[in-house]
Image: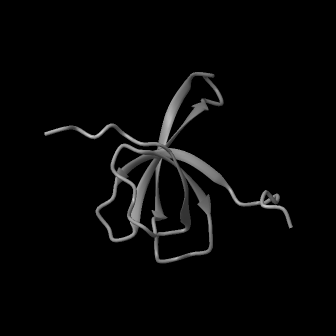
Amino acid sequence: MSKETKSNKRVLKGVVSSNKGDKTIVVSVKRSVRHPLYSKSYSVTKKYHAHDEKNEVNIGDTVQIIECVPISKNKRWNLESIVEKTKELES
């Protein structure tokens, strides 16, 4: 089989808002929605708990997460890749 096989799993892109839990990150995903009656577009933010096996992601990083089987009560997503790292502040 080739490495790139078609999957029905959802893939989302968002910003890490918390990495306090062990092997767990919280990813904020923003999307734009149009109001059905007034046609005004507004943004909606939703938070997803994702599994980060190596604890390699920091707050502010842009990541891609993929749907998976339930890992715990809240975690149903896996970290797929890090799209962009934040610049570390030098002290």
Where is residue 76, by image quadrant?
bottom right
Q: Nearer the viewer, residue 23 or 2?
A: 2
- Identified at 33% across, 37% down, the residue is 87
Where is residue 32, by image quadrant?
top right
- Identified at 33% across, 48% down, the residue is 59
Q: Quadrant of the C terminus?
A: top left
Residue 91 horizontal side relative to residue 13, left or right: left
Residue 80 horizontal side relative to residue 89, left or right: right
Q: How many marks?
A: 0
In the rendered image, residue 75, in percent from the top left (x then y), is placed at: 49, 69
Q: Quadrant of the N terminus?
A: bottom right
Q: Is residue 27 above or below residue 85?
A: below
Q: Is residue 32 above or below residue 78?
A: above
In the rendered image, residue 61, in percent from the top left (x then y), is placed at: 41, 45
- Identified at 47% across, 77% down, the residue is 72
In the rendered image, residue 65, in percent from the top left (x then y), is placed at: 56, 55
Q: Is residue 69 above or below residue 55?
A: below
Q: How is the image coloured?
A: one colour
Q: Nearer the viewer, residue 33 or 59?
A: 59
